Image (spheres, helix red, strand yellow):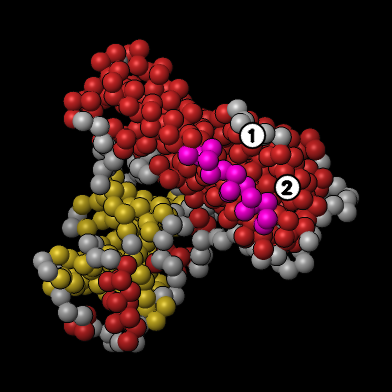
Amino acid sequence: MSYGLSVKTLLEREVKLQPPEGFDLSRVEGERREPRQFDSTYYDTDDRRLARVGVALRRRVENGGGVWQLKLPQGADRLEIELKGGETAPGRAVGLLVGLTRRRPLEPVACLRTRRQTVAVHRNGSVLAEVVLDGVSVLDGERVSGAFDELEIELVEGTEDDLRGLEQLLRGAGARDAAGSSKLARVLGLEPERAAKPAAGASPAEVLRAAVRAQLAELLVHDPGTRLGADPEDLHQLRVSTRRLRAFLRAARPLVERDWAEGLRTELGWLGSELGPVRDLDVLLEHLRAESHSLEPAESRTFRPILRALDDQRKRHRSELLRGLESDRYLALLDRLETGEPPLLETETTLHAIWHREFRLLRRAMKALGPDPADGALHAARIRVKRARYAAELARPALGKRAAQFVEAAKELQDVLGAHQDAVVAEQVLRERLADAPDAAFAVGRLVERERQRRLEARRTYRGAWKRLEQRGRALTE
């Protein structure tokens, strides 16, 4: 997939294993590929900022030709980006990593020589997966300073069940868990950092510190993908982490010095304002494209100029977002989250009390809605729901297992009220854009009617969702 880029990208789903001594790929039925040999030089900052978040940048040389490869975590998968370049890291790769490196220089940290054997596993003419046996030598100049073998299964056209079936086959032949999550992690002895959960009985301040570290980790993981723009989910998750951080700091105001917390919330609010317009248009465009596909062909054609105009608007907002992510202000915010310890106050406020205050404010807001609330009132109520939800996430160590039930019910109500707000915004945008595409009047009219139905459906169902959330909240106060 190219995603409109002048680079090659590939989404990888793989399992790494340690082969038993003397393992031979003849145990795997399939097509044997030609053996390969290549050298891979890995680059990172002097303090290993890329390795700490599971990102790898390397230059691979094979048969006299070199290519740069950047690997970014994507949940259980990894996105591999391949770029042309000489011995110096391509500017595009360096630019995607600015949020992680904070503009620190990249230097070689490991050089590996790999001798690779591959078997392609077929079924019904399709390649399900490739099973790879790598013999790896760790190079120190021209000297070999270490060696190990690695076994890898990489999905091609197969399913998760195919992947697990092959893994079971290899484990049955004696393979076991790999010694590291990647070759580089094994060589450096450095696994990607995972945000530690607060220990049992942790103080509210310790819980807050852990929550801030966890959300910073999420920001860093999704920063390169947001810059790349290949998957809208990266931008979505970056925005969610930004909002969650703001909500945590707001709810935890009794625990920390107010000016410190509000200053950080201001910067997070700025970041949210940079992310929001692009994300909102992602959601709107996805919805309107799907709706327009169900129109009559002639109607759909008249609607295309509106979609193009919205896409152009998104591109302008994305350019502004990228300037924001490249700014000193954004990097200073990341530094502040990374190195700044919250200045704590002496207080006996508990996490339960922090959550209960937000829940009490939510109940008051929902009660004030009345029988036929204005659209803006429902939008404000949704914000209250999110605050109560994030307060419950922060207070989970104190609230116990039932906190998860509250959070799930809050997500349900949040989704219903979010659909209502999305319908309100979509109708407004459709009416505004009609002036630029008068031929689309009939198509817009049909779509506006659908948005009104979506809005009415949300109004019919939100009270039931609120009732379930309120019940979960009451259970936490008993």
User: Is 81 located above or below residue 130 in the figure?
Assistant: above
Q: Earlier in the sequence, mark 2 or mark 1?
A: 2
Q: Which residues are magenta?
A: 457-472
Relative to 292, 273 lies left or right: right
Q: Quadrant of residue 445?
A: top left
Residue 456, position as x, y percentages in the image: 48, 35
Residue, disc 2:
359
Q: Quadrant of residue 144?
A: bottom left
Q: How would you rate the neighbour count of disc 1 (Cα within 10 Å): few for under 14, some for 14-19, many for 20 or more?
A: few
Q: Main secondary structure of the magenta part?
A: helix
Q: Name the residue type under label 1.
A: Pro
Residue 221, position as x, y percentages in the image: 49, 50
Rendered image: mark on residue 297 = none
Give the residue drawn at x 73%, y 47%. Answer: 359
Rendered image: mark on residue 371 = 1
User: Is 24 located above or below residue 239 in the figure?
Assistant: below
On-image quarter of the C terminus: bottom right
Give the residue drawn at x 12%, y 69%. Answer: 124
Q: Quadrant of residue 370?
A: top right
Residue 465, position as x, y percentages in the image: 58, 49
Secondary structure at numbered mark 2:
helix
Residue 75, position as x, y percentages in the image: 43, 57
Secondary structure at numbered mark 1:
loop
Give the residue drawn at x 74%, y 40%. Answer: 364
Contact between marks 2 and 1 (CB within 8 A): the answer is no
Residue closest to the eye, 67 or 390? 390
Q: How would you rate the neighbour count of disc 2 (Cα within 10 Å): few for under 14, some for 14-19, many for 20 or more?
A: many
